[in-house]
Image (cartoon, rainbow, N blue to C red):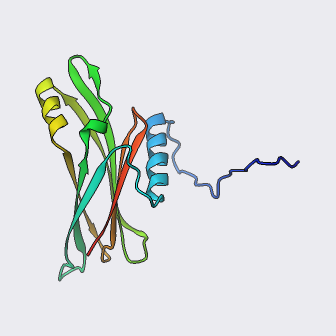
Amino acid sequence: MSRPGATVHYRHGYFARHDLVPYERRRFLTYSRVLSTGAWAPPIRDIPVGVTPRIDGPAPDTGAYDVEVDVTIDPRAILFRDEQGRHVASLDVAVFVAGAEESVAGETWEILDFRLRDDSYARLAREPLVYTARMRIAVPPRHVKAVVYDYAADRLGTAVAKVR
């Protein structure tokens, strides 16, 4: 049956798991948001994010590259809630490093949990939050992408940097 203006969406593949795991909404949604954002080229600025990569290598013995990436996050865009007198928030931070073929050569995923007293919360509002990701990769790095996701607010921020 034909429906003018309708678009069909479907999965292009299926992946089976060896072990059956219970459904966790946050993990599922975070994984989906971060991966789809990782493939999206233009920056997303719901959460202002910056990246500064530093590369050391290649190592003489292994040829590996040590990659260190500072991810700068504007804390004013994070949704904090009050919980028993603390300012509480949680961010998922993923950092991807790509080689010359633009395939992922290394990645890190981390959850940053905050339970701040008033003084720490006030200081965080004045200074950017910096998270440092470290990884070792086998190929020369060419691009770095950081994705920051605030599950509670359903907001994303991304930043990309070329490695020289």
Quarter of the image with the C terminus in it: bottom left
Residue 36 is left or right of residue 120, and the answer is: right
Give the residue at x 48% y 58%: 40
Relative to 141, does residue 147 appear above or below in the rendering? above
Where is residue 2 shown, x and y percent of the image? 86, 49
Query: Toward which corner of the image does residue 143 lie, by quadrant?
Result: bottom left
Give the residue at x 32% y 40%: 91
Where is residue 1 shown, x and y percent of the image? 88, 48
Residue 7 is left or right of residue 71, and the answer is: right
Which residue, as the protein is rendered here, is positioned at the far top? 84
Which residue, as the protein is rendered here, is positioned at the far bottom? 60
Where is residue 148 shown, x and y percent of the image? 34, 47
Where is residue 73 shown, x and y percent of the image? 26, 46
Residue 35 is left or right of residue 4, and the answer is: left
Relative to 2, does residue 102 appear above or below in the rendering? below
Give the residue at x 27% y 21%: 82
Relative to 158, does residue 67 appear above or below in the rendering? below
5, 116: nearer the viewer: 5
10, 37: nearer the viewer: 37
Q: How many marks?
A: 0
Query: Toward which corner of the image does residue 154 lie, by quadrant?
Result: top left
81, 23: nearer the viewer: 81
